[in-house]
Image (cartoon, grey):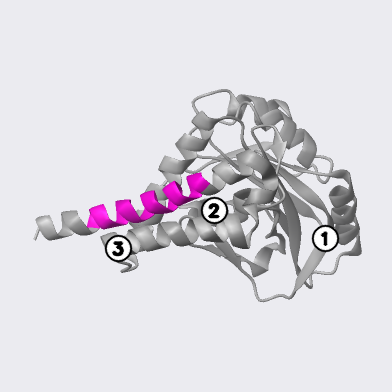
Amino acid sequence: MSSLAILILTKNEEDNIVDVVKNAKKCTDDVIIIDSGSTDKTVALAKEQGATVCFRAWTDDFSAQRNFALEQTKADWVLYLDADERLNDELIADIHRIVVDGKLDAQYVITRKSVAFGVTFNYGVLNPDHVRRMFPRKTVKWVNKVHEHPECDLPDKRLNGFIEHHTYRDWHEWEEKLCLYTSIWAEDAYKRGKRTSMVGILMHSMGGFFKMFIVRKGFLDGGLGAYLCCTHFFYTMLKYLKLHELQRLEKHNR
């Protein structure tokens, strides 16, 4: 039998931390919180639930947080879970099966379904996706500051069940994440040498809307789904506007 650690990144997650730790402990007692400076009750509540809490200062880099988490455990397997995610019973049972089997021969892909504003989405911006989250600890490394992804040479296998992702509780939370993610994306893209123009901003924004509304059939999620496709136009536009602003400042400072 192998061992498993569940790794959870947090900052000011007091509304989620108790439920996510209880959910994770259905799989393993080794639940590790990587906190980036919570000012609410996140850390205290996590400790009350029996989780191990480690601290790493936030540096606008999700991969750095996830790679740091790897250093906090000696478990054979690691499974990454966000504070607003929950494992369903079928998935928990399949994770137990893998851990008991003990073969460290694959990275595991998990279906993730989004819940936002009290609605479960099946298309468009929040359509179900498939995320790589469970790995033999020594085989994985994370890359990219935002929209990070794991690099692992092992073959993919699919776990049964799904993660339920409670992504936005309200429009205020949506706005906060919009500002954070677009800023991090623009700064990272700029450092990688990516550049854009005003025409390019418009084309990318229109392409983002078309992809979500037509290709991913966002209109099938009703009025709210269609509206989220419109907000994706704005999200994409804001990413590239921030990139363009960095270009403008560069020219101004020459």
Q: Residue at x 74, y 62 (%)?
A: 109
Residue 111 at what x, y percent from top left?
75, 56
Amino acid at circle 2: Phe
Assess whether residue 101 is covered by the magenta stretch.
Answer: no
Amino acid at circle 3: Val
Residue 249 at what x, y percent from top left?
17, 54
Q: Estimate how packed mark 1 is, as few (under 14), some (14 to 19) or many (20 or more) residues with alpha carbons within 10 Å.
A: some
Query: What residue does disc 2 label?
Result: 68
Mark 2 vs mark 1: give the one in front. 1
The quadrant of the picture occupied by the C terminus is bottom left
- Compare marks 3 and 1 and give the one earlier in the sequence: 1
Q: Which mark is residue 199?
A: 3
Q: Is residue 171 above or below residue 81?
A: above
Residue 38 at what x, y percent from top left?
51, 31
Mark 2 and mark 3 residues within 8 Å of each other at the beta carbon: no
Q: Is residue 241 above or below residue 138?
A: above
Amino acid at circle 1: Leu
Query: What residue does disc 1 label?
Result: 159
Q: Residue at x 31, y 61 (%)?
A: 190
